Image: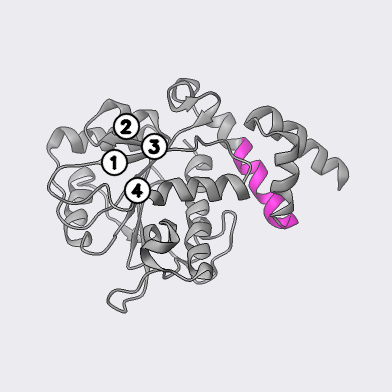
Amino acid sequence: MFYVLFIIYTTTCRLLHVEQKRFYRLISNLDLLNLLKTFPLILICLLTVPVDEIAKAQSNGEFSIGRIEYRGGGDWYNDPSSLTNLIEYAKEHVPISITNSYQDVSIGSRELHSYPFVFMTGHGNITINSAEAANVRDYLDNGGFLYIDDDYGFDQYIRPVIEEIFPDEVMVELPIAHPIYNQVFNFPNGLPKIHEHDSNPPQGFGVYRNGRLVLYYSYESNLTDGWADADIHNNPPEVADQAFRMGVNLLVYALTNER
């Protein structure tokens, strides 16, 4: 067992730029099963991401993640603390190198292609044109991953947009046995319920391209509220922890999914 941990240690510190003290703290937060499950996935990610994409998406050896800015009047900027808190939680629990802050990126910008993981949320309307739809489609077809959270009132507007981006694909509900629900933390019942709105069950949907899950959409769960500063939505700590854990699963899945 010591030999296994030593191999994990040396390889991880070299590829993920994790300091020794930080590594010891990280492995103490994971049980052995998740430890052995998580490290190979992260190493596969680093070995399979195209070098040119790494050069664009990394700064000082770290990945950056993006938040999508869109037109139409919806508040794409909602809960600005959410992603920052998720990044902090992820870095404390998984040995993966992500910049401490995220970047806002326009949905039609080529800079979108610089991020292996992008996030979108809001309440209300979103409008995209054909060029923006093509940009998102190209980004996802070339290895990117988009996570969309329905922060209540977004569903009726975002579904037509997803159809515009992928007119030939069907968004499907993911089964609870899907690996996205047990990448690092296990969710035997699937997507957790974080913030109550209409007493509807939480649902996780996805879009596949050439067999790869490129888009994940959470409905009636509201993970974003669970990531936000505790005094904003007053979620109990155990509920917020479920949101963060699911967020870590999303990040690890996106970064280790075949690109």
Q: Are marks 1 and 4 in contact (CB under 8 Å)?
A: no
Label 4: how many Cα within 10 Å (few below 14, some 14–19, many 20+): some
Residue 33 magenta-highlighted: yes
The residue at which mark 1 appears reads as 68
Q: Are marks 2 and 1 in contact (CB under 8 Å)?
A: yes
Instruction: Quote the CA–CA distance across marks 4 and 3.
Output: 22 Å
Amino acid, disc 3: Gly
Comparing labels 3 and 1, the label whose residue is closer to the camera: 1
State the residue at coordinates (65%, 30%).
17
Amino acid, disc 4: Pro
Label 2: how many Cα within 10 Å (few below 14, some 14–19, many 20+): many
* Range of residues picked out in magenta: 31-43
Comparing labels 2 and 4, the label whose residue is closer to the camera: 4
Comparing labels 2 and 3, the label whose residue is closer to the camera: 2
Instruction: Quote the CA–CA distance across marks 2 and 4.
Output: 19 Å
> Sequence-wise, which precedes: disc 2 or disc 3?
2
Instruction: Quote the CA–CA distance across marks 2 and 3.
Output: 9 Å
The residue at which mark 3 appears reads as 144
- Residue 214: in sight, yes or no? yes
Residue 138 magenta-highlighted: no
Q: Position of residue 247 (x, y in %)?
A: 47, 54
Instruction: Quote the CA–CA distance across marks 3 and 1.
Output: 13 Å
Query: Under tag 4, what secondary structure?
Result: loop
Query: Under tag 3, what secondary structure?
Result: loop
Q: Residue 80's mark?
A: 4
Q: Residue placed farthest to the bottom in the image? A: 199
Query: Under tag 1, what secondary structure?
Result: strand
**Quick one: 192 or 239, which is closer to the camera?**
239
> Sequence-wise, which precedes: disc 3 or disc 1?
1
State the residue at coordinates (43%, 35%).
116
Q: Are marks 2 and 3 in contact (CB under 8 Å)?
A: yes
The residue at which mark 2 appears reads as 112
